[in-house]
Image (spheres, rainbow, N blue to C red):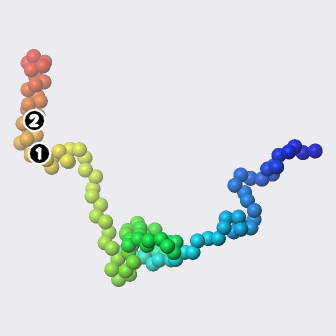
Amino acid sequence: MTGGNAIRGTRVGSGPAVGESERGEAAPRKRVDYWCANRHHSRPSFAMDAEVPEQWDCPRCGLPAGLDQENPPEARRNEPYKSHLAYVKERRSDADGMAILEEALTKLRERKGR
């Protein structure tokens, strides 16, 4: 005689084979056409009452895609990575840098007694 375990022989997450009656009806959808600058075409689906975005990332190349096939949006301009030193050089001239360095070296020499 088997024990009183009612879930024996089933997998976690398994359900009835029917499916639709268990989950309910799917929401009505609409498909929207998008084109990127590389002329890739994608058709994501949205709920009927959802707001459709003006741009969508192209799944093939990653460029922004728009609703107008003749005038797709331009690619975003990627700024190159800037180091901390690059930002400092934007704010200070070489002369400013040399003055700050000389001041720091003078303080260091005074501490060491030279």
**For the point 42% across and 76% down, which residue is it?**
34
Q: Residue furthest bottom?
A: 70
Q: Residues within 10 Å of mark 2 (few under 14, many from 20)?
A: few
Q: Judge left or right: residue 28 versus residue 57.
A: right
**For the point 8% across and 38% down, which residue is it?**
98
> What is the distance, in whole Å, between disc 2 and disc 1 at their CAs?
10 Å
> Is residue 44 visible to the viewer in this orientation of the structure?
no
Q: Position of residue 28 (x, y in %)?
A: 57, 75
Task: Using the rendered view, name the quadrant where residue 108 is placed.
Answer: top left
Foreground pick, 65 / 55: 55
Q: Amino acid at mark 2?
A: Ile
| Number of numbered discs on residues | 2
Q: Residues within 10 Å of mark 1 (few under 14, many from 20)?
A: few
Query: In the image, is residue 39 above or below residue 102?
Result: below
Foreground pick, 22 / 96: 22
Q: Which residue is mark 1?
A: 92
Which quadrant does the C terminus fall into?
top left
Which quadrant does the N terminus fall into?
top right
Q: Judge left or right: residue 68 versus residue 86.
A: right
Q: Which residue is mark 2?
A: 100
Q: Position of residue 96 (x, y in %)?
A: 7, 41
Q: Position of residue 27 (x, y in %)?
A: 58, 71
Whether residues under marks 2 and 1 lie with C-beta atoms below 8 angstroms apart, the answer is yes
Q: Amino acid at mark 1?
A: Arg
**For the point 47% across and 71% down, which residue is it?**
50
Q: Position of residue 73 (x, y in %)?
A: 33, 73
Secondary structure category for the residue under label 1: loop
Query: In the image, is residue 38 above or below residue 101?
Result: below
Closer to the chain start, of discs 2 and 1, is 1
